[in-house]
Amino acid sequence: MDKILEQQRRFFNQGLTRDVKFRLAQLKILKKNLPLLEDQVLQAIKRDFGKPEFESYISEFGQIKKEIDFFIRHLRSWSRPEKRSSILLNFPSFSEIRYEPYGLVLIISPWNLPFHLAMLPLIGALAAGNCVVLKPSELSANTSRVIAGFINNLFDKSLVFVIEGGVETSQMLLKERWDYIFFTGSKAVGKIVAQQAARNLIPCTLELGGKSPVIVTAQAHLKNAAKRIVWAKFFTGGQTCIAPDFVLAHESVYENLLQEMKAVITRFYGPDPSQSPDYSRIINKHHWQRIKDLIGAANVCCGGQTNPEQLYIAPTILRDTNWSDPVMAEEIFGPVLPVIRYREKDEIVAKLQQMEKPLAAYIFSESAEEIEYFLKRLLFGGGVVNDALVHYVNHHLPFGGVGQSGFGRYHGKESFLTFSHAKAVVHRWRMFDLPLRYPPYTAVKFKFLKKLFDWL
Ligand code: NAD
């Protein structure tokens, strides 16, 4: 690793990556070779946790193709120095922001969208002119192997290198002197990353998780809400960072919503979802056991079946959940959906405001007034009204958490900005050199200075 870092540092300092033509060339290499990888990626993710190819295409492969195209289209204009107004105190002058790469970037990614969450920050970091070391997750080992083979064959390791490995590798990497760290994963590991980064004052982005609520009000269109909540929750077997974690349903629609969601599950996955090719498995035994325990003695409305050999947990809805139930303690990150009944909207807002700020929130209502009520009072990373998950795929929007769900943002232009330092530069000339600012600071000068601040 030391040798690779030394090579990357030397290469970065040569300045080649500052040239936008060089960066575009790297993106074009990625674009040209990506189609060769499609089948391998979809199959690898399927082997990792049985994720249907259709879901992998929408949420992983297709997204990466789109992101590369978007960057190729806009990178020149994003990279141009940006003029900013000058101020009279600096007259005459000209001010600008230059977007410059940080240098050496470490990216650590999780297993749940194993291709997407490794490649998306990689594209942003390279496009901004950085050198990159990427460590994908050891839990999605098949996909990580495909990524490492692809990237390490395509690029010189002095520009980008993928290192496979687990926790020790990650910890070894975190001790190095990076110029930027981009981490996606759990809150617990996020804290470790932030501590390591702080040791060397390394700027970082933390893309973490949280308990993302869904609110279904008395004025929601129930069939629409049920269909979209079920789709979003059980997509990738509930193992997405922005999956609906729990539902807050108004008491007047509570029973109907449960019945509708139950019917939708059967419509989507058949009477026995374990036979459906469209339903994912849990990533490993540890997580399977953790999720199974959450179902425990809870009041199961539908689902609840499990199979340890297949790491299968049926799409499960829990009814009459209380805030104090174990399932409400931590992010569920699996196919279990507790549904809590509420009476007054103030009561749930007060409760949500006491909880950690989530990565996402979803509001189902046909009333603009009600939607505004919640949007104005709840703080969350990003969200959707009358649907779920879909904000994630809009590359015109920033994506990131707030509070305990992380800090920093990326996707599209936000990725470029995240991996660039905005260098502020003022250009001055020799003429009109106001003698006022130079010592000795006489009383007259001081008086004039005060007047000047009043005028400007
Ligand atoms: P994780 O935190 O366990 O692992 C993420 C990465 O950190 C892996 O590459 C792993 O090797 C490494 N790692 C694990 N333990 C470490 C340690 N002690 N020291 C240093 N590195 C370590 O997360 P996960 O289980 O892979 O992913 C699930 C979590 O990620 C969920 O909480 C989910 O909400 C979150 N997530 C967030 C986003 C987002 O965009 N905000 C996206 C996907 C997942």
Image (spheres, rainbow, N blue to C red):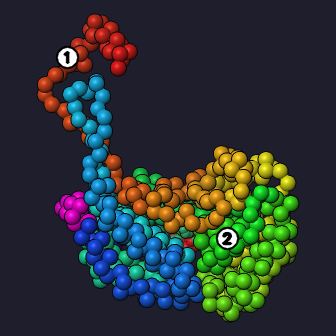
Identified at 61% across, 54% down, the residue is: 380
Q: Where does the image place residue 270, in percent across and percent down from the top left?
A: 72, 88
Q: Quadrant of the N terminus?
A: bottom left
Query: Can you see residue 332?
Result: no
Q: Which mark is residue 228?
A: 2
Q: Does the closest atom of ligand 1 sit within 8 Å of the Cβ of label 2?
A: no
Query: Can you see residue 257?
Result: yes
| Magenta region, residue range | 13-23
Q: Quadrant of the C terminus?
A: top left
The single residue placed furthest to the left in the displayed view is 430
Question: Quick one: SS at disc 2?
Answer: helix
Dot 2 crowding, Cα within 10 Å, few <14, some 14–19, many 20+? some
Q: Where does the image place residue 263, in percent across and percent down from the top left?
A: 78, 79
Q: Which residue is mark 1?
A: 435
Dot 1 crowding, Cα within 10 Å, few <14, some 14–19, many 20+? few
Q: Where does the image place residue 426, in percent across and percent down from the top left?
A: 25, 36
Quick check: is 330 in the magenta stretch?
A: no
Identified at 40% across, 81% down, the residue is: 147
Q: Main secondary structure of the magenta part?
A: helix
Q: Nearer the viewer, residue 240 or 142?
A: 240
Identified at 62% across, 86% down, the residue is: 278
